[in-house]
Image (tube, grey):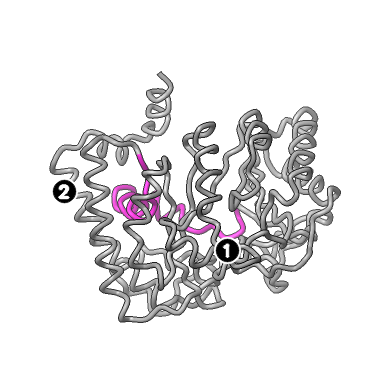
Amino acid sequence: MHYTIHMTNKCNLKCSYCYVDHGSEIMTPETARAIVDLAARDSKRAGLIFFGGEPLLLRELITETIDYAHSVEKKSGCRFFFKMTTNGLLLDDDFLDFAKRENMFIALSIDGVKEAHDKHRIDKKGVGSYDRVVIAAQKLLKLKPYSPVLMTVSPDTLHLYAEGVASLFSVGFSYVIASLDYSAQWNESQLPELEKQYNLLAELYEKKTLAEDKFYFSPFEVKISSHINSRTYCRERCELGLRQLSVGPDGKIFPCVQFVGDEKYCLGDVFSGINEKARQALYEKNEEEKAGCDRCAIRTRCNHYCACLNKQATGSIDEISPMLCAHERIVLPIADRLAERLYKQGSAIFIQKQYNDYYPLLSFIEDKK
């Protein structure tokens, strides 16, 4: 089980597409410890994901929570592992040393090239954060080279999508997790540009693969996997509230990050426990096929099942954004043609990456030699 800990709604940036209501809520140490206790009761292996707002505004609480988790490990036998998502502005050498000691997995948010990033990821004075974040990224990658980068693509930065992904690889990231801002105002006129950018990205992907680079680009990896591992992919679709929960600063429990603060989706709190009846009912509701999707040829490979995306785009887990539908219809055939080309060329690294379940482990061992 994973617990995403929304430590605070406060942030040192003012990103235009952020869905968090930036108030002054701050999690107490008592609440953080209660999350650890709940996680230890639920399973023998639990992930604690420090989230915000900006979690490094409460760095002392992070370290205290991890220390407490270690003490609980000794009593309960539950093994904890730690992650954090940050904007990077407060990621200094001291915290990086701590993260390395604790084997903390850190994801950094950068929206591609400077022009795209600084359009939306600005500080309270309206100043772009790109230059400062890249410095943090270089420090992070020096200590933790497998750290992923999170990239958000907005309508006004769409034309910089492929260039932005290439720039993130050039900074040193190997794992790029990219997503459209589905809460933005998209329209049909932008679809040709979206298709153009994915074709450019397919060229970049093919070039890097044939050069035997090791990398991950989420939109293509997920779609290729959805074909190769179709049965597993269908089984492991959005399991809303079952394998991952989000906890607000006040300790209330929600099924995922987009739902925090929405009382109708509250599943209990860390002091009284999880409302299992509400949790199961929400999961079953999300499992129902969405209106208009039941006869779609790509529905088993589409992100329409993701409750978080649907809530972000439409405000409801039951409604699908037209832009999400259009995106899936564009990216799927491009990813399939890309995979077919690489397979026919006999790319060893592509075949290992997509067909060998042990590839990530073998790749890690190889890199350590």
Vertical arrangement, residue 300 with respect to residue 147, above or below: below
The residue beneath circle 1 is 127
Helix, strand or loop status at disc 2: helix
Where residue 226 sits in the image (x, y, percent)? 34, 53
Residue closest to the far left? 344
Judging depth in this view, the residue of 183 and 293 nearest the camera is 183
Q: Quadrant of the C terminus?
A: top left
C-beta proximity under 8 Å, tags 2 and 1:
no
Q: Quadrant of residue 357?
A: top left
Where residue 266 sits in the image (x, y, percent)? 71, 67
Judging depth in this view, the residue of 150 and 283 nearest the camera is 150
In the image: residue 34, left or right of residue 78: right
- Residue type, label 2: Arg
In the image: residue 69, left or right of residue 311: right
The magenta stretch is: 215-243
**Is residue 30 at least partly visible in the picture?**
yes
Q: Residue at x 37, y 50 (%)?
A: 167
Helix, strand or loop status at disc 1: loop
- Residue type, label 1: Val
The residue beneath circle 2 is 341
Q: How far is the residue under mark 2 from the one under mark 1?
A: 43 Å
**Is residue 231 at least partly visible in the picture?**
no
Vertical arrangement, residue 329 with respect to residue 339, above or below: below
In the image: residue 311, left or right of residue 352: right
